[in-house]
Amino acid sequence: QVHLVEAGGGSVQAGGSLRVSCLASRYTFSNRYNMAWFRQAPGQEREGVAAIASDGTTTYADSVKARFTVFRDNAKNTLYLEMTSLKPEDTAMYYCAAGMGPGGRLWTVFYAYWGQGTQVTVSS
């Protein structure tokens, strides 16, 4: 079964860095699920931030390119999102997602499994 648990959120000042992680069940990584990070701010729709396919191909939203890096550690069954040069507009609940649809996509429809989210708050 697929099970995802995010961790590492918190509060940081603008310009700072933060790394969030997503511990996945062994089943998720051994079955080569495609994975992604999404975020949702209050009153806004959930948006794709970064995706990494089972073959390692990555995709980023324009708003985070050159600032965020997504990577996975298959040995630890963990997905990471390294965030640098954070801005107040990055404030949101960040969700990890897994799916067997086309890899590297940033649309929620391609992901069937979701974590509970971890809050990231960036103050100016």
Image (cartoon, rainbow, N blue to C red):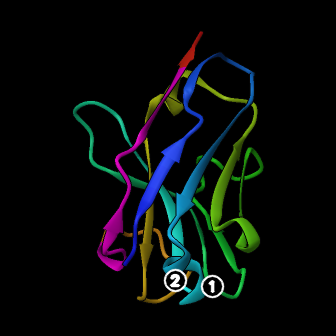
Left/right of residue 108 with respect to residue 30 in the rendered view = left
Q: Secondary structure at mark 1?
A: loop
Q: Residue at x 64, y 68 (%)?
A: 77
- CB atoms at circles 2 and 1 under 8 Å apart? yes
Residue 88 placement: quadrant: top right
User: The N terminus appears in which quarter of the rendering?
Assistant: bottom left
Q: Position of residue 81 (x, y in %)?
A: 66, 50
- Left or right: residue 72 versus residue 20 is right
Residue 20 sits above or below residue 108 on the image: above
State how far apart marks 2 and 1 are (Cα).
Answer: 6 Å
Q: Residue 83's quadrant in the figure?
A: top right
Q: Is residue 102 above or below residue 94?
A: below
Q: Which mark is residue 54?
A: 1
If the image is split into quadrants, where does the C terminus sit?
Answer: top right
Residue extending farthest top: 124
What amino acid is at disc 1? Ser
Amino acid type of the residue that numbered disc 2 sits on in the rendered structure: Tyr
Side of 6 where 3 appears, left or right = left
According to the picture, the residue beneath numbered tag 2 turns out to be 33
Give percent across and percent down for residue 27: 50, 81
Q: Earlier in the sequence, mark 2 or mark 1?
A: 2
Does 117 appear in magenta?
Answer: yes
84 and 112: which one is in front? Answer: 112
Q: Magenta residues?
A: 109-121
